[in-house]
Amino acid sequence: MKFYVNIILIVCLFSCKKQYQYDDYDEDDFIEVQGIITSAVPDGDPFNNSSVKNIRYQYYLDQNPPLIGFENIDMFEAQRGYPLIVLVHKENPDISFYGREGILDTLNTKVSTILKNHFQEMLNETK
């Protein structure tokens, strides 16, 4: 019996990977890039506020394919299609965090065109 308990503990220790948070890094390690929310669904935890959502977003929109990030945040306004500013680690672009809603002041022409097309598609969907 003790053998099985030890095996279960070892498996749990190796399978439990630490989820890093933005606060685990220095703020100067990140740059801001434009992103778009592709999915925003309630997290399903009955103990959480109804505004807590699991969001999925795309960033580095001018890459093919764009990178994808996931985060569980308390943001009532989060909806599919909303623009957001993503904080991306300078040395590892796979590390990203939700920054805030909105559109960057400085967009390159390609990302600006991608956003315009995205918003036009959203408008066409609502007609």
Image: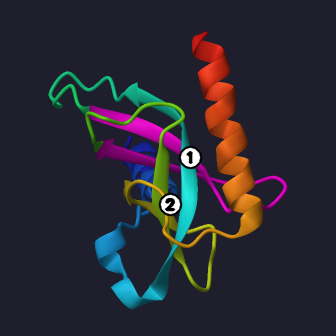
Q: Can residue 122 be seen from the camera position used here?
A: yes
Q: Between 45 and 49, which is closer to the camera in this rendering?
A: 49
Real-space Cα distance between discs 1 and 2?
A: 34 Å
- Where in the figure is residue 20, as x and y percent of width and height? 40, 67
Residue at x 80%, y 61% (from the top left corner): 63
In this picture, which residue range is highlighted in magenta?
52-73
Is residue 74 found left or right of 112 in the rendered image? left
What is the chief secondary structure element of the magenta stretch?
Answer: strand
Q: In this view, does 13 lie above or below 50?
A: below
Identify the secondary structure beneath mark 2: helix
Q: Between 11 and 100, which is closer to the camera in this rendering?
A: 100
Q: Can residue 26 be seen from the camera position used here?
A: no
Q: Residues within 10 Å of mark 1 (few under 14, many from 20)?
A: many
Identify the secondary structure beneath mark 1: strand
Residue at x 45%, y 43% (from the top left corner): 4
- Identify residue for label 2: 14
- Identify residue for label 1: 36
Of marks 1 and 2, which one's residue comes earlier in the chain? 2
Indicate the amino acid at tag 1: Ile
Q: Quadrant of residue 35?
A: bottom right
Q: Is residue 14 above or below residue 124?
A: below
